[in-house]
Image (cartoon, rainbow, N blue to C red):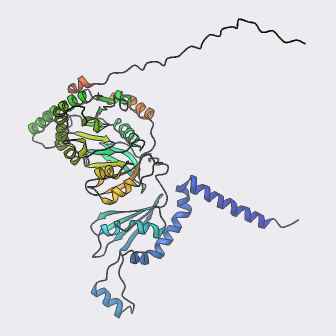
Amino acid sequence: MADLSPWVELGTVAAGAGGLGYAKARAPRAYWSLVGLPVTWGRFTWTYGSTMEVCGLTVQPSSFRAFMTRNLARREVRPVPPKVRRVAPTSTGLRVTLRLPAGLAPSDLAASTERLRHAWGVRSVTVAETKPGYVELRMTGYDVLNRVRLPRKARSRDLVVPVALREDGTVFERNYREVPMALTLGATLSGKSVYQRSLIKGLAQLPVGLIGIDCKRGVEQSRYAPRLSALVTTPDDAARLIEALVVEMEERFDLLALYGVSDLWDLPEHLRPVPLVVLIDEIAELFLVISKKDEPARDRTVMQLVRLGQMARAIGIYLEVCGQRFGSDLGRGATALRAQLTGRVVHRVNDKASAEMGLSDISPEAVVAATSIAANRPGTAVAGDTSGGWSRIRTPEITPAEAAAVCREFAHLTPELPFLAPFRPVDRMVPPLLVVPPMPTVPPRVQPRPVTE
């Protein structure tokens, strides 16, 4: 009988290779922990100095260090890269803390992330400043945005809503206390609606008032009516609602002045009005008019929106503006309103000008990233704010039925606000589908006879 051990070993190797290939495709987190992490860590350790030097991320040493190296160590004086202080593995990549030498800035490393990504064979490299003189390189080993699943511990709290996942594996959160006003752009089928559903799903679980402005006859937001304190579906009703919000804003400012505070959150809890989030589905519908006689009413509505964007943060009214395009071509007041929207989320757009409208005042690299989003990756977007920071994100798939179910579950959190009573949504009876009965079968006039021979 022939020795079967070589065949057994070959089968074991083939099974192991097949298992690794399956894990790389179907379980990338496990593959990274078993294979990718050790390989990348070793490549980073052995090539760190040369990679930094080739990428121009080194500086000349100080004269004292050069003297010690030349006369005591008897070595050639070479440029100094950032000092590695800490390497921490994660389930999605590596976190490397670097101490920057004099002459290097975080922006120098941020400009070389693409070169570092290719040099170390990772999916992405991002740079975050942790404290003066220290930065953190966040390397991602695989495409975490391929199949997005938010961690279980990511829950809504204190006006902070987890919405999407960043490309470095961290959770992108919509924090209304830090970024009160935001603009979301995206073409048709780009995933903008999925982002809105994720936002509404998280906000519905918080003790806030939700106000919907959906001028597309409510086709997007009417399903969330159980959790909405107000819902308008036409530009005329939207104008009246915005006027009511401005009146409420002025009354809340009077309340702050009465108690000598400048912010809603400085009031005692029993006196604090409920925070309000205004969700505008398609902002262009508030700008477009059919005839010239409608322009004064349009201009007043837009100016009232600008007032809300400028001052409403202090009294707990937040704007969430969405649209396909947004810029000066919409009409008077568009640029002034956009300047008040600090947060920016741009999905796939049809032209570069649309990406520039949302991201040009953040970073030129963010504009390039937004225009390179593939059509087969719905939900992928570039998120940033006017401080200059940005990142790629992707929203997990959420169906309208899931978001509507959450709104029904937390309908008891909907605040009853008297000034919103005229705009409170009513339960709509969905008309039943018309069932057409089948046509009755008419018997033939001539009865068939069997053929006989």
Residue 101, by quadrant, is bottom left
Residue nearer the viewer, 2 or 140: 140
- Determine the residue positioned at 31% across, 30% down: 228
**Relative to 140, residue 403 above or below:** above
Q: Position of residue 52 (x, y in %)?
A: 39, 75
Percent x, y of residue 324:
34, 42
Which residue shows up at 47% across the image and 58% down it? 92
The quarter of the displayed image where residue 403 is located: top left
Camera sees residue 177? yes
* Residue 448 picture location, percent across and down: 77, 9
The quadrant of the image that shows the N terminus is bottom right
The residue closer to the viewer here, 92 or 78, is: 78
User: Does any portion of residue 264 appear in the rendered image?
Assistant: no
Quarter of the figure with the C terminus:
top right
User: Does 119 appear above or below 19?
Assistant: below
Numbered disc total: 0
Residue 255 location (% of width, % of height): 12, 35
- Tell me if 450 is positioned left or right of 433 in this view: right
Residue 35 vertical placement versus 180 (above, below) = below
Is 167 on the left or on the right of 246, as rendered?
right
Determine whether 159 is above or below 217 in the image: below
